[in-house]
Amino acid sequence: MLLRLYDETPAHRDNFLKLVREGFYNGTLFHRVIKDFMIQGGDPQSVGAPRSKALGSGDVGYTIEAEFNSALFHKRGALCAARQGDQVNPEKRSSGCQFYIVWGKTYNDSQIAQLERQMKMQALQGEFDALVRERRDEILQLRRNRDQAGLLALQDELEAMANAQVAQKQLGKLSDEQKKCYRELGGTPFLDGQYTVFGEIESGLDIVAKIQAVGTDSNDRPLKDIEMSAEVID
């Protein structure tokens, strides 16, 4: 597979190039394959891992700040950074090494409309949660004072602010280009704005299709190990 990295996501680009040049990915596995969704790799613990070993938690000791860009989205063939979940990672920081390549599926107009509604609700919750974190001390003080009226007023204020931010940032909306890609090419649009997209496959999408078709165990690990190696082409 030939991958092109985006200049619009420089931190992810430079980190990926660094790891490739160091030979970090050589011998690691595509350890997680989910049909009609994606293939994931880059766990350093996957090198020579026995079948009994649980994979997916390996890292390089650091994370990367999210680099979201509405022009870069989860179309089929997109290269994206894996990360820990929102509960332990509210800033959506990326893994320093693990990545996935999107496969996904195609969507009709009705499904796209439903997705936009879901994405808007998700965006509203995300903006609201961020505002709550910013106003945490104020909320705790109101609770200590048992000021229910104050808490309700603050909640209304934060909800209004979250709605305004979603509208200003145009979150939960798919561009015409996104809609066209998801109709005709396929992808995983529900991940847009949640995980950093930092590259795409220039050629070799058929390889992803072949990996998508392999048998997997109950942990989504391929029954036959799929090792990778990587090099930088200048």
Image: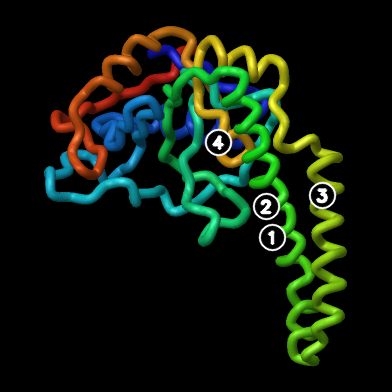
Q: Which residue type does callout 1 highlight?
A: Asp
- Residue sitting at 25 percent across and 20 percent down? 213
Label of residue 55 in the image: none
Q: Choose the circle earlier in sequence order: 1 or 3.
A: 1
- Residue sitting at 55 percent across and 36 percent down? 191
Tag 4–tag 2 contact (CB < 8 Å): no
Residue denoted by label 3: 163
Tag 1–tag 2 contact (CB < 8 Å): yes
- Badge 1 crowding class, 10 Å Cα cut-off, few under 14, some 14 to 19, many 20 or more, is some
Q: Which residue type does callout 3 highlight?
A: Asn
Q: Choose the circle earlier in sequence order: 4 or 1.
A: 1
Q: Quadrant of residue 143?
A: bottom right
In-image side of 3 versus 151 (left or right): left
In-image side of 152 versus 57 (left or right): right
Residue denoted by label 4: 191
Residue denoted by label 1: 129
Q: CA distance from mark 1 to mark 3?
A: 12 Å
Q: Which residue type does callout 4 highlight?
A: Leu
Q: Choose the circle earlier in sequence order: 4 or 2.
A: 2
Q: Nearer the viewer, mark 3 or mark 4?
A: 3
Q: Secondary structure at mark 1?
A: helix
